[in-house]
Image (cartoon, rainbow, N blue to C red):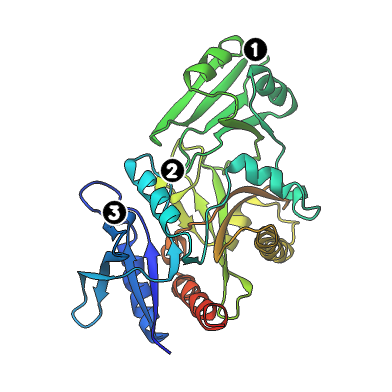
Amino acid sequence: MPRLILGILTLYLNDAGLLEERRIYEQMTIEGDKLDIQVIVFTPSDVLTKRKKVKAHIYDLKNMKWIRQWVAIPNLIFDRCRIQKSHRMKELRVFKSNFSNLHYLNRPLGNKWTMHQKLLTSPFIKKYLPHTIKYENNSDLTQMLKKYNVVYVKPVNGTGGRGILRIERHTRNNVKVQGRDHNRRIISPRTISIITLKDFINKWNVTATSYLVQEGIPLTLSNGRVHDYRILVQKDGNGSWMVTGGAGRIGAARSITANLHGGGSAVAMTRLMQSFVNVEVDLSRVQEEINTLAIELASFLEGEGYQLCELAIDLAIDRDGNIWIIELNPKPSREVFREIGELERYYDSIRRPLEYAKYEYLYRLNQ
């Protein structure tokens, strides 16, 4: 049987050809070689469609450097393309349309509202969802503020914390607003009246169909920073879902989100829970519930027709130990494990998609 070639599909970060996650791809190449898998990396910009060739980035293990080489487009694709506002997204759509017959280990999920609606159909999962509504007009926001002390206004298609607002009832007639703009820059807290909130929202380009309003879960630590938890669940070499690990994340100063790309930092999960959750809460029970939820969530989405090989689940845990699903990410980073010193989990997170790729190659593509 010929050696498995796994193509990692990604996007250039800019027109100068900068690749994200090169260190990860180097390690995937090293781990792939141990499994008799050749890893190549390419973007839609590197493809010659008519010839079905790609000028791939290949990490030369012998000389420990990156080279470029023309190769046939591999049949097995690990899609690592993250959403960006550029012409490269159009190139990605064209590539997937031209090569829809390839075997993709994973495919994109729907937007935040689509996924919320889908998860609500699961009796097990829906109890972990914060109250969320589609923004239609300003009355939706004011009604949610009457019900909850804090609400988040999120773009349906936003990523990385971009365009998110946190709105907190300050007094009877005023609210405190803070967030990140559409370029992820931190917006300092400001107090405005309920009356002028509508104008503020309109200037933020919050429109029907593009935003949702969500119940705010208390996430602020004693130092004033917000926190959450990142759980990574992946397919293993037997095609089964398993939890690779989890980590806590603490946001940057004045940030309303905890993601690392927004300046946050990673900490050990248990340590962070111990610093925030009430002492009478059984944290081992919470961890067990998180693991059960993660497996159930990934299995549910797979059963609903979503093609995944890994999924990151961002969770909030309130002081009473209640678990809340904040967001799903089908293109997760692995750096949280490296940052907290859990190198075994870090290497597991790199190796498992390769093991699953080999499972797909041996037991599905060659049947």
> Neighbour class for label 1 at 10 Å: few (<14), some, many (≥20)?
few
Q: Amino acid at mark 2?
A: Ala
Q: Amino acid at mark 3?
A: Ser
- Separation (CA) of disc 1 from disc 3: 53 Å
Which of discs 2 and 3 lies nearer the camera? The answer is 3
In x, y percent, where is residue 118?
A: 70, 47
Q: Is residue 123 above or below residue 179?
A: below
Residue 173 is tagged as 1
The residue lying toward the viewer, choosing from 332 and 68, is 68
For marks 1 and 3, the one nearer the N-term is 3
Q: Are marks 2 and 1 in contact (CB under 8 Å)?
A: no
In x, y percent, where is residue 308?
A: 57, 63
- For this orientation, the residue located farthest to the top is 195
Residue occupied by mark 3: 45
Q: Are marks 1 and 3 in contact (CB under 8 Å)?
A: no
Residue occupied by mark 2: 252
